[in-house]
Every structure is written in structure tokens, then in C-alpha cells.
Image (tube, rainbow, N blue to C red):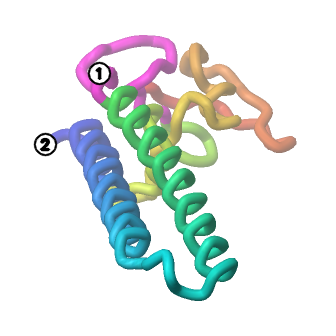
Amino acid sequence: MNIKQELQEFCQEYVKDRTVRIQKSISDIQESLASETKSSAGDKHETGRAMLQLDREKLGQQLLEVERMAIILSRVSITMKTNAVLLGSLVKTSKRDYFLAISAGAYEGAAEPIYCISRATPIGKLLLGKSIGDVVDFDGEKIRIAQIV
């Protein structure tokens, strides 16, 4: 298995785990809402229900975001060869290595960590469309693109 395949699977696992966690939290909130009865504690009860509803809405938004990540990930091509940084590129720079797909954190399965980032991140925006040898200025630091895989 090549490194880009490993990175893609790492991102897919991240999306799957996050989806499961969010769905479990939503289920737990649904159970809490269902188990509360109207006769208990008056205003405190209504406040508790309102808080649970807010939490449920936040989790719903998080679930939508994870679904968007899954869609983006489904569009990632790890086989395309290109001279410019695009979605699915493994970018080796003078500072760090980046896999442009979704923001899933650091992949530790390589000699050096590879940071899985989305094209919407500040560094992702800077790298997108750049070529080998290009230099980007990120947080006052000059970063040179050494290789695009």
C-alpha cells in the first residue's frame, strides 16, 4: 500500500469515527429528552429540555460538517499525477508534509508526521495551485515546496 492510500484510509477512518461519536451523542440526547416527564421541576425542567435541544442542534450541525467531509473525501484522487498542488496531493515542504484532503490531524504512520488538512485551512489555501520550488509565507515563515506526490 502506498503512502497516499494510507493517508486516504486514515482520513476515511477519521470521518467514520467522528460520525459514530456524533450519532451516539445525538442518540443519548434523544433518550434524555424522551425520558424526561412534563411533571418534574417546572422551569428547571424546561431549561434542561431547552439545553438538550441546543446540544442536539449543535450535534446536528457537526454531523452535517462530517457529511461534507465525507463528500470531499470521496472526490479525492490519490492516483492523479500533477505538477501543481490540488485536492489529493501529498505536499512535502521545507517545514512539514501535508496531505490536502480534509482536516483530520496528523498521520503518524510515516517517518515524519503528515498533516491531513483541508483546502480551506490557511496553509491549504496558500499551497493550493502552487508548484515544486514555489515559496509561501505562512505566519511569517518562508515554506518551500520540495515535492508534490
What is the quadrant of the N terminus in the image?
A: top left
The residue that appears at 66% across and 82% down in the rendered structure is 44
The residue that appears at 46% across and 56% down in the rendered structure is 106
Please give left or right for residue 91 compared with residue 51 in the image: left
* Residue 64 percent across, percent down from the top left: 44, 39
The quarter holding residue 138 reads top right
Which of the marked residues, 1 or 2, is nearer the chain's N terminus?
2
Residue sitting farthest toward the bottom: 41
- Magenta stretch? 74-91
Please give left or right for residue 44 compared with residue 149 in the image: right
Please give left or right for residue 31 compared with residue 141 in the image: left
Q: In what element is the residue under mark 1?
A: loop
Amino acid on which the number 2 mark rests in the picture: Met
The answer to whether residue 90 is magenta is yes
Q: CA distance from mark 1 to mark 2?
A: 15 Å
* Residue 118 percent across, percent down from the top left: 52, 35
The residue that appears at 61% across and 30% down in the rendered structure is 120
60 vs 24: above or below: above
The residue singled out by tag 2 in the image is 1
* Residue 116 percent across, percent down from the top left: 46, 45
Residue closer to the observer: 61 or 71 = 61
107 vs 1: above or below: below
The residue singled out by tag 1 in the image is 77
Q: What secondary structure characterizes most of the magenta part? A: loop
